[in-house]
Amino acid sequence: MSRKILKMILFVLVTLTVTFAANTNNNTTATTSLSNETTPEQMPMRCPDFKVYAGNNTLNIPYTITCCIAIVCAFYFALFGYRGFKFSLFLVGFIFATLITFVILNNHTTLPLWGLIAVSLAVGLFCGLLTTFVIYCGLFLGGFSFGFFIGIFIFYIVHLFIHITIKWIPFGILLGLSLIFGILALRFQKPLFILSTSMLGGVLATGGVDYFVEGFELLDFTWKRIVASDGQITCWVTCVVLAIWPVLFIMGNLIQFVKTGKTFNHLAGKNSVSLQGEDKAMQRYRSLNMNGDVVAKSYYQGEEPGKATEV
């Protein structure tokens, strides 16, 4: 059952990626060359007229609430992501499905903002419950998101040296890394889930702070890297906001590997329930044979009758 669900998820992800890439190619002009000559000109990151977005603009209520919740969830992921395993699985599925649904509906429908949020939350709730009860789906999505954001961070570094203009390169790299880490998460469950929750914590905190400080300037720059469009970081404040990501990622890994997740194992509960059931059955039937006669406990332990048990 879980294998069929994973195959369905993979098929949907591949289909969405191909469709989205095709739409991007139709809406933008693609360049088929990639060389050192396309290296972006380094602009001085000076912003003397910088003003905090939250202090000089009317905040959008849905965005404000969402970013506040994202920052709270970020610290939960970084500190207790693996410790609260079940709830983290729910959040991974909920956040992943909500964001994907919101992006798709925002680009292809004319629903008002509150309608987009309502539909996205409904889909996110369903997927959150799915990842909670089907653990392998949650682990796969956790590894998938880790690989995706690893690819995003690689694009940040590559952009300093060369500008990618071929649309399929970012999509191919992101999809490949996401699938690789998603599959690895099914094999190395504990370490990769800790890495995934720490990564999500850094990303959510960075996105939330980015809205209040710059009004999603960093998010806009990230989107341009994904679609291989032109874009530059023109203010040093953006770099400061971006630094939250690796700092919280490293902090989350240290805290979880050393403290909160060191002695916890999500598989221990399953094993303990199984052993507990076996003990109850043994205690119930250890003194009865099939005919209802009382027999010695040593009969079930393979001891010879009449032989004293060594203590």
Image (spheres, rainbow, N blue to C red):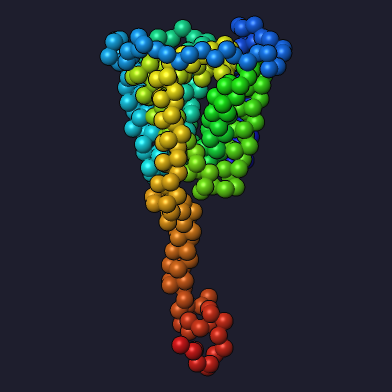
Extreme left residue here? 55
Residue 277 position within the rendered picture, expressed as x and y whole percent measured from the top left: 45, 63
Residue 12 vs 165, above or below: the answer is below
- Towards the viewer: 297 or 160: 160
Instruction: Give the residue drawn at x 32%, y 22%.
Output: 65
Quadrant in the picture for the N terminus: top right
Whether residue 294 is visible here, answered yes or no, is yes
Instruction: Give the residue drawn at x 57%, y 21%.
Output: 160
Instruction: Give the residue drawn at x 48%, y 13%.
Output: 44
Whether residue 105 is visible here, answered yes or no, is no
Residue 175: which quarter of the image? Answer: top right
Question: Could you tell whether 245 is left or right of 165 in the image?
Answer: left
Residue 232 position within the rendered picture, expressed as x and y whole percent measured from the top left: 52, 14
Instruction: Give the residue drawn at x 56%, y 18%.
Output: 225
- Towards the viewer: 298 or 28: 28
Residue 182 vs 166, above or below: the answer is below
Residue 297 vs 146, above or below: the answer is below
- Towards the viewer: 13 or 156: 156
Question: Could you tell whether 226 is left or right of 293 in the image?
Answer: right
Question: Could you tell whether 145 is left or right of 37 in the image?
Answer: left
